[in-house]
Image: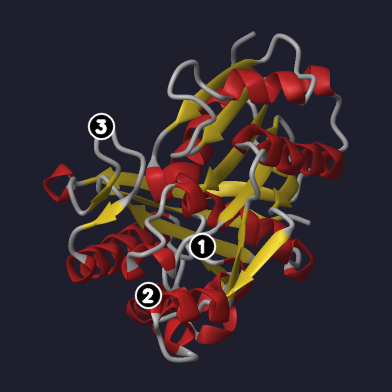
Amino acid sequence: MSGSYPSSIIGFGHAVPKRQVFNAEIEIKLGLEAGWIERRTGIRSRYWVEDGETLTDMAAAAGRMALANAGIARSEIGMVLLATSTPDHLLPPSAPLLAHKLGLIGAGAVDLAGACSGFLYALVMGDALMRTQGRAVLIVAANILSRRINRQERASAVMFGDAAGAVVLAPSQSGFCSLVSSTLTSDGSHYGLIGIPAGETLMTMRNGRTMFAQAVMTMAECGKTVLQQANVEPAAIGHFVPHQANARIFDAVAEQLQLSNAVTARTITDYGNSSAATIPLSLSLGKNQYRKDDLILLTAAGAGLTGGAALLSYTG
């Protein structure tokens, strides 16, 4: 089947582990004063998996919620895109296992490793695929970062959590959201700022200040690009849903984009930074706040350096 089809987000979903880890537990272990983490990051708690919990199990829980929210039959899903930096295995990819756990028989399935920008990459690619093939796409962004951080290293131990978020894209003009404009970018000159070297298991952060500055610049520039593409003024944005890297980062981005704190999503407070999962998690948690014709701006930047932005129109 080929042609040109309308595209809408028709379902949202999310999932987190049961274990909620509050700042006090980490501050005591690292010898930090009470309140140190929240003052510097905006985080009060995050969720960490227990032994035996897998990435695809958490991703499947988010996917089931999104499929139920969409009210769509499993047979209508033509592709599964899994945005993750922490797959169950390096080989084979985890997306086919996710599709199997969801009963999506015969659907294509592939992992996308776009770091913190992974959901935006998957959203843009999924939208293009849906528009040309006319079959629904399930996008899940999920990470288990608690197994990839050095819990003795302050820079990573205080920030990261585990979560999954999901959306269903379908050939419809009557869904919740449509993609108005988008942009994706990368800058490999900053490739080594955050990473897990080959053969190792723990994340390293080499220069937090540089990463902070590059993230702010990338997210702000990408946000400006999609607003200009759509000929939309900042005052028209009803909801700003940035990647929840650090509250100071997205507050600086909002200031550059001339967006008020009132429109900015702040799921980082309770859920921490789950990399690619933060934007779909925030969308799912906030879906009842959206009203017809609201414009929703998404921006992200992450390791690689990768970045992007998207503008959604909520159709209700």
Spatial CA distance of label 2 from label 1 is: 11 Å
> Is residue 135 visible to us here?
no
- Amino acid on which the number 1 mark rests in the picture: Leu
Upstream in sequence: badge 2 or badge 3: 3
- Amino acid on which the number 3 mark rests in the picture: Ala
At mark 3, the secondary structure is loop
- Residue at the image position 41 percent from the left and 35 percent from the top: 113
Work out whether residue 118 or residue 125 is closer to the camera in this orientation and state it. Answer: 118
Upstream in sequence: badge 1 or badge 3: 3
**Alpha-carbon neighbours of circle 2 within 10 Å: few (<14), some, or many (≥20)?**
some
Upstream in sequence: badge 2 or badge 1: 2
Say which quadrant the N terminus sits in.
top right
Residue tagged by mark 2? 257
Residue tagged by mark 3? 198
Badge 2 vs badge 1, beta-carbon distance below 8 Å? yes
- Residue at the image position 50 percent from the left and 20 percent from the top: 93
Residue tagged by mark 1? 297
Say which quadrant the C terminus sits in.
bottom right
**Alpha-carbon neighbours of circle 3 within 10 Å: few (<14), some, or many (≥20)?**
few
Q: Is residue 129 left or right of residue 254?
A: right
| Residue 190 point in image, percent of width and height | 16, 51
| Residue 312 point in image, percent of width and height | 58, 54
> Is residue 169 visible to us here?
yes
| Residue 21 point in image, percent of width and height | 62, 68
- Amino acid on which the number 2 mark rests in the picture: Leu
**Location of residue 88 by image quarter:** top right
At mark 2, the secondary structure is loop
Identify the residue at the far left of this view: 189
Spatial CA distance of label 2 from label 3 is: 37 Å
Work out whether residue 250 or residue 145 is closer to the camera in this orientation and state it. Answer: 145
- Residue at the image position 28 percent from the left and 46 percent from the top: 195
Q: Is residue 109 left or right of residue 171?
A: left
